[in-house]
Image (tube, rainbow, N blue to C red):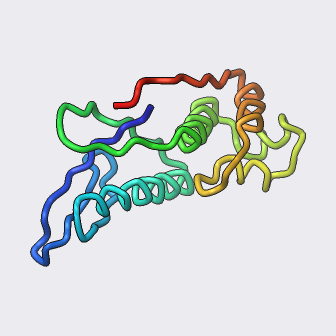
Amino acid sequence: MLRYPVKLERDTNGTILASFPDVPEAHTFGKDREQALARAADALETAFMGYMENRLAIPEPSSVKRGSYVALQALTEAKLALYSAMRAGRISKTELARRLNCHLPQVDRLLNLGHGSRLDRLETAFRALGKELSVQILDAA
């Protein structure tokens, strides 16, 4: 599970600012701690969409020693892993579409963090890259 440390601090107007040391482009706010944390996950995903659009590496999260963190949804984590595997293997979206025998928009949806892709589609994409998708169940923190 990807857990990114989040820094929460009170702003001069009383809102709570949320920022990520590992992802400086991701920041948001909320009227209280709970709202700031709820919005922080969206800010993190939005920043990652920008990284993917600009073909940049997704930064690894630093360890969470103490304090707050944002855990990414499993589907988001799988999509980020697919993007990272494609980057590492220098596989373009066009090449992945060729390997999957599908159209480019279908690959775009697999990489779109806002799209609810099916797990079996992601498994097929990983296999086309010589990878295997595995699901791990952990006790809740």
Q: Is residue 71 left or right of residue 132?
A: left
Q: Is residue 15 left or right of residue 5?
A: left
Q: Is residue 95 above or below residue 13?
A: above
Q: Quadrant of residue 118?
A: top right
The residue closer to the viewer here, 129 or 40, is: 40
**Residue in view at x 20 percent, y 65 percent:** 16
What is the x, y in percent for residue 71?
40, 41
Q: Is residue 59 above or below residue 48?
A: above
Q: Residue furthest right?
A: 101
What is the x, y in percent for residue 26?
35, 58
Q: How many marks?
A: 0
Q: Residue furthest left?
A: 12
Q: Is residue 11 above or below residue 115?
A: below
Q: Residue furthest front?
A: 140
Q: Quadrant of residue 3?
A: top left
Q: Quadrant of the N terminus?
A: top left
Q: Quadrant of the C terminus?
A: top left
Q: Is residue 43 left or right of residue 118?
A: left
**Residue in view at x 63 percent, y 30 percent:** 89
**Residue in view at x 24 percent, y 44 percent:** 68
What is the x, y in percent for residue 92?
70, 42
**Residue in view at x 76 percent, y 34 percent:** 120
The residue closer to the viewer here, 36 or 55, is: 36
Q: Quadrant of residue 123?
A: top right
